[in-house]
Amino acid sequence: MSHSDHNTPGHNNTDTDSLLNHEYDGIRELDNPTPGWWHAIFIATVLFSAVYYLFWEHSEFAWSEHDIHKKAQVAEYKRFFGELGDLSPDTPTMTMLMQRAEMMAIAESMYITNCAQCHAKDGGGINGVNLTDDHYKSVKAMPDIFTVITQGAGNGAMPAWRTNFSENERVLLAAFVASLRGRTPAAPRAPEGEVIPPWDAAR
């Protein structure tokens, strides 16, 4: 093809016009700019990252996974307690709660969050008493667990949780603590207090 062919009427010079002026090993690069939508997404991502960082790392209004979990937990409490009404801190009520797996799952979450640091996750005791054996220091019957949780014991060694939990929550937590009796913890603390009768006999 002669040089004149490139300039004949109707010949498309678009490809030639779009070539960049530099050349590598006989290859010339086509001028094909990044689409505008790609630039828009990139800029939006950078801006979102900046806002995200400022919100989660430096804002007092940011919420954490713990906050989200807590809100979900509160909603679950209200749903369950709405079904049951006001719970009484007595042996029949606590026994009923112990037999409901969904209730014990909620109570276990409460226990692990608030009690496990002293009594261990499995109830075997750390600096708090072992909750899995038959020895108790301030408990003679199941409702006494609710009293200890509410009022505390041991001159403050066991803190009072009256202001931390509603009465329903304390009844539920007491039922879970009662359910720990008879389990086999990994590293049980030595028994403390006196042996009391089984729950079905200690009313």
Image: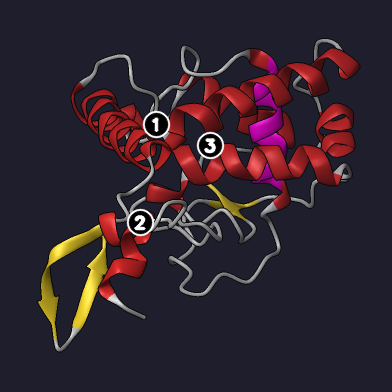
* Dot 3 alpha-carbon crowd within 10 angstroms: few under 14, some 14 to 19, many 20 or more: some
Q: In the image, which is nearer the foreground, mark 2 or mark 1?
A: 2
* Residue range highlighted in magenta: 168-178
Q: CA distance from mark 2 to mark 3?
A: 96 Å
Residue 88 visible in the displayed image: no
Residue at point 55% right, 18% down?
A: 165
| Quarter occupied by residue 69 | top right
**Magenta-drawn stretch contains 174:** yes
Q: Residues within 10 Å of mark 1 (few under 14, many from 20)?
A: few
Determine contact: label 3, label 1, CB under 8 Å.
Answer: no
Q: Which residue is mark 1?
A: 64
Q: Is residue 12 left or right of residue 137?
A: left
Mark 3 — residue?
138
Q: Amino acid at mark 1?
A: Ser
Q: Nearer the viewer, residue 113 or 179?
A: 113
* Position in image of residue 95 (x %, y %): 86, 38
Q: Secondary structure at mark 1?
A: loop
Which residue shows up at 80% across the image and 19% down it?
79
Magenta region, main secondary structure? helix
Q: Position of residue 107 (x, y in %)?
A: 66, 38
Nearer the observer, 121 or 188 = 121
Please state which amino acid type lies under the numbered disc 2: Asn
Does the stretch in magenta take in 50? no
Q: Is residue 56 visible?
A: yes
Spot occupied by residue 191 in the image (x, y as percentages of width and height):
49, 62
Q: Which residue is mark 2?
A: 13
Q: Quick one: label 2 or label 1, which is nearer the N terminus?
A: 2
Alpha carbon of mark 2 to alpha carbon of mark 1: how far? Answer: 60 Å
Q: CA distance from mark 3 to mark 1?
A: 38 Å
